[in-house]
Image: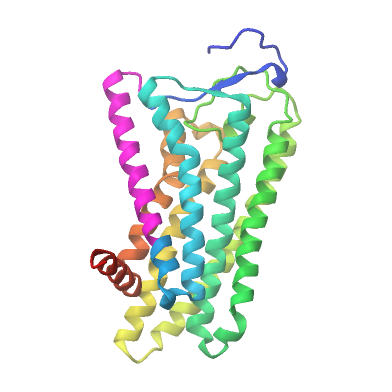
C-alpha cells in the first residue's frame, strides 16, 4: 500500500486516498474510460431529455411527472459524483483523490442516493393514490403537497449525508489510505479505522438500514394494493396502462435496494475487491443510466410529449 509521506496513525495526517483501479493494463484502462464515457453521456442525455420534456410540456405538469423530474435531477447528480472521477482515473492512470475531495464525494453521493430512495418511496405512494384512490388524488396530491414531499426527500437525504459524512471522517484512520472501491464509500473507509469509534458509524448504518427497510415495506405494500386494484380493472387497456407505469418503477426500486443493501450489509467474509466493485457499480451507476430508458420506453405520454417537443424545435 502506498502511503504519502508524513502519514501517522491519525486521519488528520492523511492528505489523499487511493481508489481502486478497474484495470492495470493500459489498453483495459482506456477501454474502461470509453465505456464509462458512453454510460455517462447516455445518462446525461436521457435524464436531460426527461427534465426538458417535462419542464416544457404543460400537459406533463402533474404529480407523477413532477416526481419523475426530481428523480432525473437526482440521477444526474449521483452519476456525476462518481463516474467523472472514475473516467479521469482510467484516462490518466491516477487513482489519487484528496482527503477533502473524498469527503465531498461521499457526502454528495450519500445525499443524492438517499434522497432518490425517499423519492422512489413517495412515487410508490403517488401511484397507489392514483390507482387505488383516484377520487381523492387531487386532494391528497395537490401541488403544495407534492412540493412538500419532494422537499422532504431532498432535505432528509441532506441530513442523512451530513450525519454519515461527519461521523465517518471523524474516525482515526491508521490502516493505510487505499480504498478497495472506485469511489469513496463508507464501508471502505471504515475498514481503515483503528478505533472502536467505527462502531458508532456501524450503528448509524443500521439505523439507516432500518429506515430504508421501513420504506421498502411501504413500497411493497403499496404495490400489492396497486396490483390488486389493477386486476379488478375490466378494461384490458386500463390494466396495461397501469402496469406500464408501475412495473418499471418496481424494477428500478428492486435493483437499487437489493444491490445497495448487499453492498452495505454483506458480511466481511464474502467481501472481495472485484465483488465490491461490481455490486457498487450496479447500485451507483446502473439505475441513473437506465432510469430514463425504462421510464421513457414504457410511457406513451412522455414519448408523445418528447416527439412533439422535437418536432416543434425542428420546425422553428
* Residue plotted at (35% across, 55% down): 46
Quadrant in the picture for the C terminus? bottom left
The residues colored magenta run 23-50
| 76 lies left or right of 299 | right
| 176 lies left or right of 22 | right
* Residue plotted at (69% across, 16% down): 13
- Residue 104 visible, this angle: yes
Where is residue 84? Give x, y as percent: 43, 35
- Residue nearest the viewer, comparing 96 with 281: 96
Residue 25 sits inside the magenta stretch? yes
- Residue 186 visible, this angle: no
* Residue plotted at (68% across, 34% down): 168
| 196 lies left or right of 206 | right
Where is residue 79? Give x, y as percent: 46, 44
Where is residue 191? Give x, y as percent: 61, 27
Residue furthest to the front in view is: 316
Determine whether 13 is above or below 212 in the image: above
Where is residue 61? Give x, y as percent: 47, 74
Determine whether 154 is above or below 235 in the image: above
Amino acid at each position: 500500500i502506498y502511503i504519502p509521506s508524513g502519514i501517522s496513525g491519525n486521519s488528520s495526517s492523511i492528505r489523499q486516498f487511493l481508489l481502486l483501479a478497474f484495470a492495470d493494463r493500459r489498453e483495459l484502462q482506456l477501454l474502461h474510460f470509453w465505456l464509462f464515457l458512453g454510460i455517462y453521456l447516455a445518462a446525461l442525455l436521457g435524464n436531460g431529455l426527461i427534465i426538458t420534456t417535462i419542464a416544457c410540456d404543460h400537459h406533463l405538469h402533474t404529480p407523477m411527472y413532477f416526481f419523475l423530474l426530481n428523480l432525473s435531477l437526482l440521477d444526474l447528480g449521483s452519476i456525476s459524483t462518481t463516474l467523472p472521477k472514475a473516467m479521469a482515473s482510467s484516462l490518466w492512470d491516477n487513482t489519487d483523490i484528496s482527503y477533502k475531495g473524498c469527503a465531498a464525494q461521499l457526502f454528495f453521493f450519500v445525499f443524492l442516493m438517499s434522497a432518490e430512495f425517499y423519492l422512489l418511496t413517495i412515487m410508490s405512494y403517488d401511484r397507489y393514490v392514483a390507482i387505488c384512490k383516484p377520487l381523492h388524488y387531487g386532494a391528497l396530491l395537490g401541488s403544495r403537497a407534492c412540493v412538500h414531499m419532494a422537499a422532504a426527500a431532498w432535505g432528509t437525504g441532506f441530513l442523512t449525508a451530513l450525519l454519515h459524512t461527519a461521523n465517518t471522517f471523524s474516525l482515526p484512520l491508521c490502516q493505510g489510505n487505499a480504498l478497495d472501491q472506485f469511489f469513496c464509500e463508507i464501508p471502505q473507509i471504515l475498514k481503515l479505522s483503528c478505533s472502536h469509534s467505527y462502531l458508532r458509524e456501524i450503528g448509524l448504518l443500521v439505523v439507516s438500514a432500518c429506515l430504508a427497510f421501513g420504506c421498502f415495506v411501504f413500497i411493497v405494500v403499496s404495490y400489492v394494493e396497486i396490483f390488486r386494484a389493477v386486476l379488478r380493472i375490466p378494461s384490458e387497456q386500463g390494466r396495461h396502462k397501469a402496469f406500464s407505469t408501475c412495473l418499471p418503477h418496481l424494477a428500478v426500486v428492486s435493483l437499487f435496494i437489493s444491490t445497495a443493501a448487499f453492498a452495505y450489509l454483506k458480511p466481511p467474509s464474502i467481501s472481495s475487491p472485484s465483488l465490491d466493485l461490481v455490486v457498487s457499480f450496479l447500485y451507483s451507476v446502473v439505475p441513473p443510466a437506465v432510469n430514463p430508458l425504462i421510464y421513457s420506453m414504457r410511457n406513451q405520454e412522455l414519448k408523445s410529449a418528447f416527439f412533439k417537443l422535437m418536432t416543434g424545435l425542428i420546425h422553428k
